[in-house]
């Protein structure tokens, strides 16, 4: 992979530092898929991708792994192929499992930072609690659905978020586990009230994934991803 343009911007030392880090992405759909691809283009060369799901036709409107040609394929397999097409030297471990409280300790190992892009509140909470209790760096994506305005995502603490049902439910669980802080990417706009299946549009998950990827890169450059 030609990293010359990246080196111009951040320098050779930082480019090499980025390449050595290992990033685990849990949930490789709309948000996680974009985060993974952008991190690969930024120079990350070591990935673990965790997702049990396959591409469905309803994913095509917003997920980077979703095409007519990939429907029915495992998302992690499609994403692995895409990353290797960006950088043939990338080392990628795929785990086709649904992370939960029972298996999280077996799935999260030997990584510098976990990027949490899970939708399920129960499983998301299990991942966050495990990482916090075992000193794994983690950043979590909050809600990106039921919105179509110009996205206003920011990196903040979960206890500073508002108008986000996912964050609200998580805060309760985190308090129960005495977790006082969690770095998240959240949107400040108010979602539409829609009953049933969450609505989505192409650019919202992409923007959330973009902010996640930028946080990871900048954390590595600043020396905040140390483990």
Image (cartoon, rainbow, N blue to C red):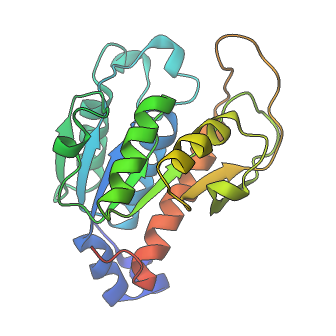
Question: Is 142 on the left or on the right of 226, as rendered?
Answer: right
What is the quadrant of residue 223 in the picture? bottom left
Q: Nearer the viewer, residue 176 or 82?
A: 176
Determine whether 132 is above or below 199 in the image: below
Determine whether 106 is above or below 54 in the image: below
In the image, residue 149 lies at what x, y percent?
A: 82, 39
Question: Is 112 on the left or on the right of 28, as rendered?
Answer: left
Determine whether 138 is above or below 82 in the image: below
Q: Residue at x 45, y 66 (%)?
A: 216
In the image, residue 156 lies at what x, y percent?
A: 65, 62
Q: Residue at x 39, y 36 (%)?
A: 27
What is the quadrant of residue 170 in the picture? top right
Determine whether 56 is above or below 227 in the image: above
In the image, residue 112 lies at what x, y percent?
A: 28, 66
From this viewpoint, is residue 142 visible?
no
Q: Residue at x 66, y 20 (%)?
A: 198
What is the quadrant of residue 159 in the picture? bottom right
Question: Is 222 on the left or on the right of 21, as rendered?
Answer: right
Q: Residue at x 72, y 39 (%)?
A: 164
Q: Nearer the viewer, residue 67 or 194?
A: 194
The quadrant in which the N terminus is found is bottom left
């Amino acid at each position: 992979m030609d990293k010359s343009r990246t080196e111009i911007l951040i320098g050779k030392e930082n480019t090499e530092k980025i390449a050595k880090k290992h990033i685990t992405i849990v949930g490789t759909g709309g948000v996680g898929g974009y985060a993974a691809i952008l991190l690969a283009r930024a120079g990350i060369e070591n990935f673990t991708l965790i997702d049990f799901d396959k591409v469905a036709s309803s994913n095509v409107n917003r997920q980077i792994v979703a095409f007519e040609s990939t429907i029915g394929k495992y998302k992690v397999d499609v994403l692995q192929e895409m990353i290797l097409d960006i950088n043939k030297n990338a080392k990628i471990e795929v785990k086709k499992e649904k992370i939960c409280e029972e298996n999280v300790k077996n799935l999260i190992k030997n990584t510098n930072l976990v990027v949490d892009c899970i939708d399920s509140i129960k499983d998301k909470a299990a991942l966050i609690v495990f990482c916090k209790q075992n000193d794994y760096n983690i950043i979590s994506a909050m809600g990106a659905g039921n919105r179509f305005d110009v996205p206003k995502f920011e990196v903040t603490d979960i206890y500073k978020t508002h108008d986000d049902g996912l964050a609200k439910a998580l805060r309760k669980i985190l308090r129960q586990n005495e977790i006082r802080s969690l770095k998240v990417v959240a949107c400040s706009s108010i979602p539409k009230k829609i009953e049933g299946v969450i609505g989505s549009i192409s650019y919202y998950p992409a923007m959330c994934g973009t902010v996640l990827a930028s946080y990871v890169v900048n954390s590595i450059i600043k020396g905040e991803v140390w483990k």
